[in-house]
Amino acid sequence: MQHLSESVYEGLCCIVGTSRVVAMRRDVVDIVEIVGNQLLKNFHKMLSGSQKEGLRLKGSDFDNMIWTTHDKVIWNLSQTRYHQEVRQRLILADVRHSPPGFALLQNFGSWLDFTDKPDSFMHGPCVSGVSYNGVEYDFAYCFASDFWPPSASSWIDRCHSWPQPAVVNDVVKSGCHFVPIGHKLGNHPDEEWRISFSLAEQKLVYAMNHCQLLVYGLLKISLKEVFYIMLGNSCNLLCSYHMKTAIFWVLQQNFIPYWHPQNLLECFWVCFKLILKWVYEGICPNFFIPENNMCLQNIYGEAQKNLFNGLHTLYLRGISFLLFSPSIRPYLVIYVLQNPRLYICTDECTIISEFDFEMKLFKEIKGQARLHVPVADFNTFMKALNIIEQLYINGSSLSPYHFFTLKRLRVVALQNTTFLLHMHINSGAINKLRYSADKLARNMLKLAAKTDCISDLLYLGIYYYKTFRFKEALSVIKKTKDKLAQPYLVYESYTEAFGEHTWSATMRETRAIEIILFNKICYINELMPEQESSLQNRSGVLVINVHIFSHMLEFFCYCNIDPIKAKSALDDLQNIVYNYQGFNHKELRDIVWQILGICQQMAGELQAALHSYQQSLQYKYHGIQRATLMRVQSLHCEGGL
């Protein structure tokens, strides 16, 4: 069992991540959250769940909690003395008439519309939907309390062996939150609020050693790849929160004194047996408020019996039921079928190479390091730049991953500040001021292009095009396309021969990400109808593939100086759209086909443009259908189609 555990440990380090990879992910998310919350006014947002914990498992969603900073929940009137600010509104939590783990909130007014986003649907206390790259997201609107719930005071007394006292104190000081969902069997199911310990849970997951975190990851993998698949509908009663609760209880009760790679499967089995016991008894005690039985609402009667029978069947198979997991099977087969005496090295340095680590770092920054600005205006981006600079100045406690992420955020802020500056100055400034602003804008974009990835060059090309410097724009486009054609380009998850190059030497020269256009900022006049349509559908940005964008911008430039070369540029764009869509997220193809249609319409190829617009209408992500239909109507006016 020892060598089998080591083999699975190695596999989980590849699937879940090594301790270094997990720490990097947490640093990236944390610094983005710090910057974002300083930009928000009167609100606070927190990422929770797997993304916050540093796990990137297939199917993991983005769980976000958002609350107003001027609303505070208290447990008794004596706590009002801790909230003396004039603008704060105090809300009293009343648990007397609610089941354990729930409360009624008194003396508060109207709250946010929980479905205030198109194509979202209710999922528990959250607004849910799917992002362009297929990642599910949840937004839980809630209230915050700075005080630990009295009903959870017993948790403090239970913390003898785990977690450490410093962690316990930090958890208690973090308070709790209230999410808008009532107990199905309570007296006020439509008015109750569930007490949420998301911040406390995040701190506890951070307190796990790496073997414990991998067991938690293995429980989540087993739930999705084995329990759900093998047991069918009966297993839908279980969720990842049951898995987290199980490992918390096992850790706190000290069922296993030592957690290490050699006994990973033994630790997993103890957690699985605890879940089996809960289902059999119909009692799953909440980790913080044990009186809150999490089986009470749905795991009972015939459903409970079917779920237990299914889990018990897996139990009788022993640890071999993990062979049903597509992710884990290869690491079990290597040991069982190929070489039971094979030496398994659990040294992280041998499991993930430096190159692989840098790819994960690039992917993480690409996916997470975006400025979530409340308002896309000049002052907001200037504020973002000031926040980032202050973090740099006071950055003695920041990790290298914090700095990498701040660097990316600064690039985004520089780019958008430049175009907002141009919009402001161009609206009525005197010539001398325009000249100074133009020089500043070009310098800011050149600085942004020097400090990060290839695709950032295109923002300078956009600016040159916008200011009628077509030859300068074409020069930038050529330089960008030459770099994009390099055989060792890293774009999304696609990588070719990279040799032994490291981040410090070549990563800046080989990275490319999508072009992100904030819909409230005018970058290119030709795309304004799409931005306006997208904005009307409450989408904040257009996300455009860098290859598509570079060909589009090249076509726009040649339309102004060389019609023959414009035709050639259009042919190249059409070729890449029709024959090379593999690099592009399927959901983003609405804007891809739209761009091709725009270029074809400008070139007078009206029938081809109509076909492209029809293709664009098949995809809904950006919400540009109104612009598409407007352009289709203009085609009929132009050519009588």
Image (spheres, rainbow, N blue to C red):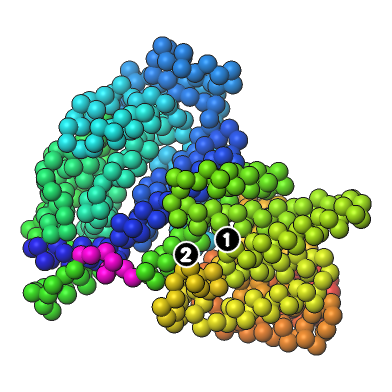
Quarter of the figure with residue 178: top left
Residue 108: x and y, percent?
52, 22
Task: Give above or below for 573 relative to 261.
Answer: below
Q: Earlier in the sequence, mark 2 or mark 1?
A: 2
| Type of amino acid at the residue the image marks with label 2 | Phe
Q: Position of residue 523 (x, y in %)?
A: 74, 61
Residue tagged 1: 621
Q: Is residue 233 left or right of residue 603?
A: left
Q: Position of residue 402 (x, y in %)?
A: 47, 52
Report if residue 370 is visible in the image: no
Q: Residue at x 8, y 74 (%)?
A: 341
**In the rendered image, which quarter contains the N terminus?**
bottom left
Q: Secondary structure at mark 2?
A: helix
Q: Which residues are magenta?
A: 346-353
Q: Badge 2 is on which residue?
A: 362
Residue 197 visible, this angle:
yes
- Side of 412 relative to 190 (left or right): right
The magenta stretch spans residue 155? no
In the depicted view, which residue is nearer to us: 426 or 569? 426
Task: Judge from the rendering whether residue 204 lies leftward or rightward of residue 627; answer left or right.
Answer: left
